[in-house]
């Protein structure tokens, strides 16, 4: 049972971090929207899915194949930019069309949750039945299948004893950490970032202080969506596949990561994402891959039982209101 | 008859008529209510008739089967989840777990130990309630959205454990689950309502109608008792309730157990009708759709919840006409319906008032400024404003 | 008729309950509800104008399977095959024509049960080709049995289906036991594997097949490792790491091609050198697309189906391959021949003058003809009397036939 784990500790760790990096980036969207609106934006996973198709489209437009080395980094940057713009835009559109009407009516967050589920089903089906057949030229029956595009030339960039890291995994990891740092700076240093924090802390007071709530909410969705777009591009480099339904499982995991780290907490998303990625890999190694999700959710339940606000905690003033 | 007249004065628009019906209902004397109850039950019994089916299920689907396999089950499950979400105000995203516990209980004890349907029903209800307590015990101290993700995780754990366990045949599931025994050969209007075969779905539908009626009576009694008042207090302001001496934890646990028991009974009928179950019957989408039924219909109001469940089970089948786009339309319909009636199609009066105040259930969305009657920072119910940490 | 007066009341109340629909919609519903009560009042039941069986010169044969879902790639070819057979038959201007009606179950048992009831009661089908997958066959079997309507599945391979004692159920494909015995034999004697990793997608079909392969190679002295992956997940790196440290000669995957492609790609990229193999569910070019041509090279696929593009097995196979290409503009694909054979079995029965489901079923037990590449004759359980397993190998972007498991030669 543990032999495999001990023997292959490093490969599992590396794969866990590469997976966790994507969880962490997607978790940011959940955590930011939750922080500002107290809303579980279920459709966020679909925003990420849109990003994977943008990444796919970018590669097809550029018509590249077998890219490696520095060129790959350049390509990833282009893909990430395109996906971030489209996903960010899609997230804003989602907010305006599905959530803002509810917000203006003072609807319960439960209503918004159902709206989110509806939007999620809509986006999935939009890609399966319209976008994939029309834009990517697949037959209707193929719309529900993953669309593949093989373009990465994989090489091992680090090879020290048991530690072997391929170029795609390194790009995923570094890309994610870079975006995290950038976001942290944005939230803490800029005026808009201050607006987001103020709104999260106390919306009424924020309004009195002259914060434009609609602008802050839009910005939150834009930034969260853009992060999901970058995550999608990184994911696409690693798996070279876009699938209308891929967001479902990844979304649940990313949300779990957000809660695990402490929802509403940006650094918590990073910690939660990596922790979840590692738990999943180690769990698969010890219990078998079929128990992977059971391990992930069990860890979540245990953590919440003993530390009800996640690993890093929700915030300074939290807990019971 | 009065009911009809009254609704015409409703202010039109989506669900306006329904509100009028509800307001009229609130002042209707007892005998009128009883007449309506009886008529509703008669209507429910006549519902599977072919001439209704030709409109409701035009595309080759069998209407009585739709009623029993989809609509009836959804209505029953939605009534169960309504206890948890609508009455006690706890967000449960893993309700399918209890449905699965019910289904697997009859599957295991029916095929391996040869219990009969009615014994299994009682056992399944007990075990589902127990699973509700087991899940609720450690997690009900969590609030709002933490509870949501924990229940979601629990739902997935139950499904995956079933899928990975050879004891229940893993992904292949359980076959040969006992059907209810035939009660009598009695025949009326060409239906044998107590003979449970494979071909005629109507007897199962009637069984579900019975379960639904019993559930409604049971929940209605609870709602107007001390338990129901405690739930209302918890959902509006848990801290205040606690301070006023309501043992909140115990009542939350009760809501979980009762909801779970109802879900389990749904699982029993489903498994007995299908005679086979597998883990894929119990995916997250079922939880999401049942929750959507409750909220869409009008969380906390049983007629509304039933209407919501009916629509959500029936619409995707009715939209089969445009085969490829039916789920696309369905998703869009959910968004549009919530935008027009965020409080649900047919909310109860009390709930409508609570929601307007921003209390009750899950509270309103945090950054609310433009909405009516927003009242200070604490208004978002349970979830305290949290800070995006520096 | 005495209760007649009281009926309109509940119908109006129902109108209220449906008040969310637009007003004119409500009126329609109300009218329908009222007419429902009226017909009920006169106790007139079952007045159906569906036609079909009664009319004498046309009968309906259904086809059920996943036509729009994610595994529709495995079901559309047999649908086409069946459609081709029936169109060819109708073109001969027979006494009794056949109406072909497809039902899309999306492969889901709970949808299949609803559809099959409609097919039996409203469309009055005299026979059903399908359901395509085992899970839905499992669920619809008892219903078809009670309705006494025969079915012939082109592609449901689960072993236990034949063990239910169903009298109206048949299939024109070898089951998983035969497939795993054939493929297991091929793995140990032709590929000479000592270590075999069996991976499955944790679904009904995939796990059944992978487990059966494990059981087939174990007695021949092979060391085995078993593992399941999530069909909805995309990251299989934990499984790749496991297989790498086990270092098998052959990796056999039980599941469908979308997952097989993903797994094979990640295995090759992770540096696994073993021979990759899978079963009938992965026998589609989507596998090559998913894995990438380079990663898929040399992958082998076992199947109880015969895809004989060159038409080497018999003259009928050759004609079928040409006709299919002409009609659908694509070469014969997985289970297309089985779809054609299943339809032909029904056609033979109808040609012999049987138009009642029960008579057709009786005739099916005696049916004996040369199908597309194999003889079609059912045993008492509804299984094919002779069953062969064939092996295919990925070469460039195609999957040509190597031969049956006993004859196939590996370079």
Image: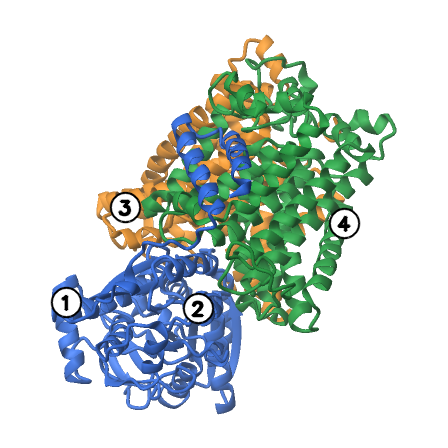
Q: Residue at x 42, y 46 (%)?
A: B51
Residue C250 in which image quadrant: bottom left
In percent of width and height, residue C225 lies at 53, 76
Residue at image position (25%, 70%) is: C336
**Residue beneath disc 2:** C147
Residue pointed to by mark 3: A59
Which subunit holds the residue at mark 4? B
The chain identifier of the residue carrying mark 2 reads: C
Disc 1 and disc 3: Cα gap in Å? 33 Å
Chain letter for the green colouring in the rendering: B
Closer to us: mark 2 or mark 3?
2
Residue mark closest to the camera, 1 vs 2: 2
- Spot the blue chain and give its letter: C
What residue is shown with label 1? C325
Front one among C237 and C339: C339
* Tag 3 and tag 4 share a subunit: no
Compute the Cα span from label 1 to label 2: 37 Å
* Local secondary structure at mark 2: helix
């Amino acid at each position: 049972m543990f032999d495999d784990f001990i023997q292959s500790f490093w490969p599992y760790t590396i794969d866990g971090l590469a997976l966790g990096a994507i969880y962490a980036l997607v978790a940011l969207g959940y955590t930011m929207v939750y922080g500002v609106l107290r809303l579980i934006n279920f459709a966020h996973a679909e925003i990420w899915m849109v990003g994977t198709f943008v990444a796919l489209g970018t590669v097809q437009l550029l018509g590249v194949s077998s890219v490696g080395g520095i060129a790959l980094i350049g390509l990833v940057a282009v893909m990430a930019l395109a996906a971030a713009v489209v996903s960010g835009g899609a997230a804003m559109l989602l907010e305006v069309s599905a959530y803002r009407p509810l917000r203006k009516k003072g609807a319960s967050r439960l209503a918004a949750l159902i709206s989110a589920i509806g939007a999620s089903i809509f986006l999935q089906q939009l890609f399966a039945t319209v976008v994939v057949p029309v834009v990517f030229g697949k037959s209707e029956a193929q719309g529900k299948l993953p669309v593949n595009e093989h373009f990465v030339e994989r090489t091992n960039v680090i090879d020290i004893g048991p530690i072997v890291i391929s170029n795609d995994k390194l790009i995923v990891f570094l890309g994610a950490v870079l975006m995290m740092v950038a976001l942290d700076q944005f939230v803490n240093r800029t005026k808009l970032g201050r607006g987001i924090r103020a709104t999260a802390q106390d919306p009424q007071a924020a309004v009195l202080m002259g914060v434009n709530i609609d602008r802050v909410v839009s910005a939150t969705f834009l930034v969260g969506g853009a992060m999901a777009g970058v995550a999608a591009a990184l994911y696409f480099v690693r798996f070279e596949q876009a699938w209308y339904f891929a967001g479902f499982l990844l979304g649940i995991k990313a949300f779990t990561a957000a809660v695990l780290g402490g929802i509403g907490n940006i650094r918590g998303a990073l910690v939660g994402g990596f922790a979840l990625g590692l738990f999943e890999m180690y769990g698969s190694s010890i219990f078998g891959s079929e128990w992977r999700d059971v391990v992930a959710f069990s860890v979540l339940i245990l953590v919440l039982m003993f530390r009800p606000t996640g690993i890093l905690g929700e915030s300074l003033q939290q807990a019971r209101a | 008859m009065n009911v009809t007249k009254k609704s015409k004065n409703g202010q039109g628009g989506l669900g306006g008529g329904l509100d009028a019906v509800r307001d009229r209902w609130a002042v209707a004397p007892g005998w009128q209510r009883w007449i309506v109850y009886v008529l509703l039950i008669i209507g429910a019994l006549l519902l599977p008739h072919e001439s209704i089916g030709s409109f409701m299920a035009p595309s080759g689907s069998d209407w009585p089967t739709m009623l029993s396999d989809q609509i009836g089950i959804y209505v029953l499950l939605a009534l169960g989840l309504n206890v948890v979400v609508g009455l006690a105000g706890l967000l449960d995203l893993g309700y399918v777990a209890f449905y699965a516990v019910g289904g697997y209980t009859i599957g295991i004890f029916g095929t391996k130990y040869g219990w009969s349907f009615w014994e299994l029903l009682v056992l399944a209800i007990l075990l589902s309630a127990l699973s509700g307590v087991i899940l609720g015990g450690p997690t009900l101290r969590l609030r709002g959205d933490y509870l949501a993700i924990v229940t979601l995780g629990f739902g997935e754990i139950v499904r995956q454990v079933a899928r990975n366990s050879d004891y229940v045949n893993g992904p292949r599931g359980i076959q040969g689950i006992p059907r209810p025994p035939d009660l009598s050969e009695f025949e009326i209007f060409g239906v044998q309502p107590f003979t449970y075969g494979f071909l005629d779905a109507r007897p199962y539908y009637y069984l579900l109608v019975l379960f639904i009626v019993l559930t409604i009576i049971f929940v209605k009694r609870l709602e107007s008792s001390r338990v129901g008042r405690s739930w209302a207090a918890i959902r509006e302001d848990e801290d205040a309730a606690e301070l006023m001496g309501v043992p909140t934890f115990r009542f939350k646990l009760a809501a979980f157990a009762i909801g779970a028991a109802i879900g389990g009974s749904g699982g029993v009928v489903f498994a007995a009708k299908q005679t086979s179950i597998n883990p894929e019957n119990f995916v997250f989408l079922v939880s999401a759709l049942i929750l959507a039924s409750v909220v869409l219909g009008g969380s906390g109001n049983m007629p509304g919840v039933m209407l919501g469940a009916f629509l959500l089970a029936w619409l995707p089948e009715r939209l089969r006409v445009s085969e490829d786009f039916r789920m696309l339309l369905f998703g869009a319909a959910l968004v549009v319906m919530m935008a027009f009636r965020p409080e649900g199609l047919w909310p109860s009066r009390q709930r409508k008032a609570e929601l307007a105040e921003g209390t009750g259930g899950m509270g309103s969305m945090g950054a609310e400024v433009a909405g009516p009657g927003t009242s200070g920072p604490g208004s978002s119910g349970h979830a305290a404003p949290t800070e995006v940490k520096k | 008729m005495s209760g007649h007066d009281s009926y309109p009341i509940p119908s109006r109340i129902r109108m209220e309950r449906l008040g969310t629909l637009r007003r004119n919609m409500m009126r329609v519903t109300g009218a329908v509800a009222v007419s429902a009560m009226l017909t009920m009042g006169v106790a007139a039941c079952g007045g159906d104008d569906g036609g079909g069986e009664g009319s004498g010169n046309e009968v309906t044969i259904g086809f059920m399977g996943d036509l729009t879902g994610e595994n529709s790639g495995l079901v559309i070819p047999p649908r086409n095959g069946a459609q081709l057979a029936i169109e060819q038959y109708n073109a001969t201007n027979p006494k009794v024509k056949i109406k072909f009606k497809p039902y899309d179950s999306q492969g889901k048992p709970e949808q299949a049960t609803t559809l099959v009831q409609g097919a039996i009661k409203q469309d009055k089908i005299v026979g059903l080709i399908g359901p395509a997958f085992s899970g839905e066959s499992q669920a619809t079997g008892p219903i078809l049995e009670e309705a006494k309507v025969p079915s012939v599945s082109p592609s449901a391979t689960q072993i236990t289906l034949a063990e239910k004692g169903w009298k109206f159920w048949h299939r024109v494909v070898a089951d998983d036991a035969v497939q795993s015995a054939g493929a297991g034999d091929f793995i140990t004697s032709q590929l000479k594997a000592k270590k075999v990793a069996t991976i499955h997608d944790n679904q009904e079909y995939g796990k059944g097949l992978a487990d059966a392969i494990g059981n087939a190679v174990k007695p021949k002295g092979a060391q085995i490792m078993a593992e399941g992956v999530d069909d909805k997940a995309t990251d299989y790196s934990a499984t790749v790491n496991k297989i790498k440290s086990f270092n098998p000669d052959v990796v056999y995957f039980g599941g469908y091609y979308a997952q097989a492609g993903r797994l094979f790609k990640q295995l090759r990229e992770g540096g696994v050198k073993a021979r990759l193999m899978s079963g009938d569910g992965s026998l589609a070019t989507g596998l090559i697309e998913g894995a990438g041509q380079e990663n898929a090279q040399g992958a082998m696929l076992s199947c109880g189906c015969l895809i004989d593009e060159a038409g080497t097995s018999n003259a009928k196979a050759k004609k079928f391959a040409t006709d299919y290409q002409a009609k659908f503009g694509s070469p014969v694909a997985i289970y297309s021949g089985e779809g054609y054979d299943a339809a032909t079995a029904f056609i033979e029965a109808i040609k012999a003058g049987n138009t009642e489901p029960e008579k057709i079923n009786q005739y099916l037990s005696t049916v004996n003809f040369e199908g597309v590449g194999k003889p079609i004759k059912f045993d008492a359980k509804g299984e094919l009397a002779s069953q062969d397993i064939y092996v295919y190998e990925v070469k460039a972007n195609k999957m040509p036939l190597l031969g049956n498991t006993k004859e196939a030669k590996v370079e």
